[in-house]
């Protein structure tokens, strides 16, 4: 299941190649960092989580089976577990998940988008952790439902149920917020 470009590099990592490991870190660290930052809304913690993700991957590389799971899925699963640990340690259920805007619009439009993003973030953070994780993985990180289900250790049906319930709750919360 490892993508063709990663296959040789992963084989070298599994054999203990530190240079191949550095290549994996270089290729995937930004995406892992972005996921952790969206989940924790804390850049410093996100950096720590990203670093710890790769340390844990290196240490447990013998358990990684590239024929069964994609490398990105495996790395995100590690990062997801570290984010859960972060929330448990810090009990930060009320924190917000940032929404990044790539727009080149006017300052007024950017301001309106940031206000809307803040409202959505606030609503998103009120969801239970599993619903929030499902929505972040599928809608912010653009994982397929199959890959997101693997990261969360769920069936695709269970993930779809979390997404449906999460979207429904968000819709209710946002309807009240925007009245």
Image (spheres, rainbow, N blue to C red):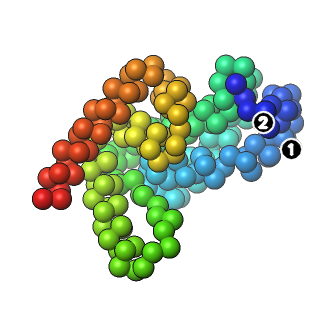
Q: Position of residue 169 (x, y in %)?
A: 23, 40
- The residue closer to the viewer here, 54 or 143, is 143
Crowdedness of circle 2 by 10 Å Cα count: few (<14), some, many (20+)?
some
| Residue 145 visible from this viewpoint | yes
Which residue shows up at 37% across the image and 74% down it? 109
Is 169 displayed left or right of 149 in the figure? left
* Farthest-out residue, front: 105
- The residue closer to the viewer here, 116 or 52, is 116
Which residue shows up at 72% across the image and 29% down it? 2
Q: CA distance from mark 2 to mark 1?
A: 14 Å
- What number of labels is visible? 2
Q: Position of residue 54 (x, y in %)?
A: 67, 41
Q: Position of residue 123 (x, y in %)?
A: 27, 50
Q: In this figure, which residue is indicated by the disc labeled 2? A: 6
Is 106 displayed left or right of 150 in the figure? left
Crowdedness of circle 1 by 10 Å Cα count: few (<14), some, many (20+)?
few
Is 120 displayed left or right of 67 in the figure? left
Q: In this figure, which residue is indicated by the disc labeled 1? A: 19
Disc 1 element? helix
In the rendered image, the vertical position of residue 49 relative to residue 15, given as above or below: below
Q: Are marks 2 and 1 in contact (CB under 8 Å)?
A: no
For the N terminus, the image quarter is top right
Give the mark, 2 or 1, whose residue is nearer the N terminus: 2
In the rendered image, the vertical position of residue 44 relative to residue 11, given as above or below: below
Which residue shows up at 64% across the image and 36% down it? 72
In the rendered image, the vertical position of residue 99 relative to residue 89, given as above or below: below
Q: Position of residue 39 (x, y in %)?
A: 44, 47
For the C terminus, the image quarter is bottom left
**Which marked residue is nearer to the observer: mark 2 or mark 1?**
2
């Amino acid at each position: 299941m490892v993508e063709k470009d990663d296959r040789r590099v992963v084989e070298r990592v599994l054999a203990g190649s530190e240079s191949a490991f550095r290549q994996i870190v270089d290729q995937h660290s930004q995406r892992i960092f972005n996921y952790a930052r969206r989940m924790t809304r804390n850049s410093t913690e996100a950096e720590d989580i990203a670093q710890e993700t790769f340390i844990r991957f290196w240490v447990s590389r013998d358990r990684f089976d590239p024929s069964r799971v994609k490398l990105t899925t495996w790395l995100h699963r590690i990062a997801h577990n570290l984010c859960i640990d972060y929330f448990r340690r810090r009990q930060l259920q009320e924190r917000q998940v940032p929404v990044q805007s790539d727009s080149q619009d006017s300052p007024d439009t950017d301001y309106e988008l940031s206000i809307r993003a803040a409202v959505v973030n606030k609503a998103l953070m009120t969801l239970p952790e599993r619903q929030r994780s499902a929505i972040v993985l599928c809608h912010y990180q653009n994982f397929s439902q199959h890959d997101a289900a693997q990261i969360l250790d769920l069936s695709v049906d269970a993930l779809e149920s979390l997404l449906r319930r999460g979207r429904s709750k968000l819709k209710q919360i946002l309807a009240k917020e925007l009245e």
